[in-house]
Amino acid sequence: MKPDRTDSSAHSWFRSANCDARYGAALLVTVLLLLALGATGGWGRASLQYERGALAHYQWWRLLSAHLVHLGWRHALLNCAGLMLLWVLFAREFSPRRWLWIVLLAAATIDAGLWFLRPTVEWYLGASGVLHGVWAAGACMMYRRGEDLGAALLLLLIVKLVYEHQSGSSLFEGDLPLVSAAHLFGTLGGLLGALLPRAPAKPL
């Protein structure tokens, strides 16, 4: 009986951390994807990052791939750590389909914001902008349910955005180059994804 209790306890812990079954597999695949693209080094960055000149020449895959590549291992590992923390906090706040919508909307908002509102930004890469969208969406849902943690996390997000805008440096990533506008645009995209009403289901 003792192994059964241990297995039950382990399963309960993984579920409480949103790392059980398909949730755990999805997190593992996402982290491995970010690390695998990190292993491509300079070639991957040059081929996949947001780059105004390349986008002007119809390399539109960069609008998505830019959010998956990083400056180096340190940058990638920091974003993977951020992803895992947000996963523990928020993975079950929305359905997988809704999360996909939120992530894609955050990425699209960053791309559009940089292109139309920040034309001086020549290049951008990294998952942090989209992660800000995830943070905003998850905390917003918690807040709407009346949870104090949601309000605290939204306040922390606002403080972080203001600090980065004023200082020009990242609160968590130290001396890594920062495009603070990407964090702001990602936050706005995440909030839109969380607050926009769902499309009605089609009748069978």
Image: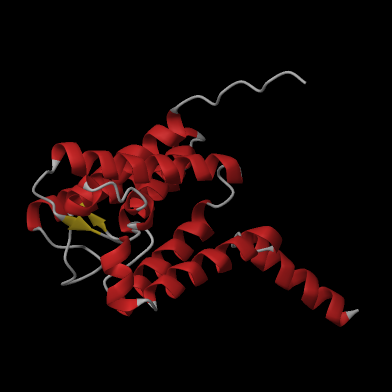
Name the residue located 49 percent from the left edge and 39 percent from the top edge: 101
Please say if 109 is above or below 27: above
Residue 114 % position (x, y): 20, 44
User: Which residue extends farthest right?
Assistant: 1
Q: Does residue 102 lie above or below 121 as drawn? A: above
Seen at 86% across and 75% down, the residue is 4
Which quadrant, please, contains the C terminus?
top right
- Whether 80 is drawn above or below 121: the answer is below
**Is 201 on the left-hand or right-hand side of 158?**
right
Q: Residue at x 65, y 66 (%)?
A: 14
| On-image quarter of the N terminus | bottom right
Percent from the top left, x then y, of residue 67? 35, 57
Q: Is residue 167 left or right of residue 38?
A: left
Residue 105 place in picture, x, y as percent: 40, 39
Residue nearest the viewer, comparing 22 with 141: 22
The number of callouts visible is 0
Q: Position of residue 183 (x, y in %)?
A: 26, 50
Q: Quadrant of residue 93?
A: top right
Q: Residue furthest top?
A: 203
Quadrant of the image occupied by residue 199? top right
Q: In this rendering, is residue 183 above or below 74?
A: above
Q: Nearer the viewer, residue 109 or 141?
A: 109
Which residue, as the protein is rendered here, is positioned at the far bottom? 2
Q: Pick the residue in front: 144 or 93.
A: 93
**Camera sees residue 152:** no
Q: How is the image coloured?
A: secondary structure
Residue 142 in view, yes or no: yes
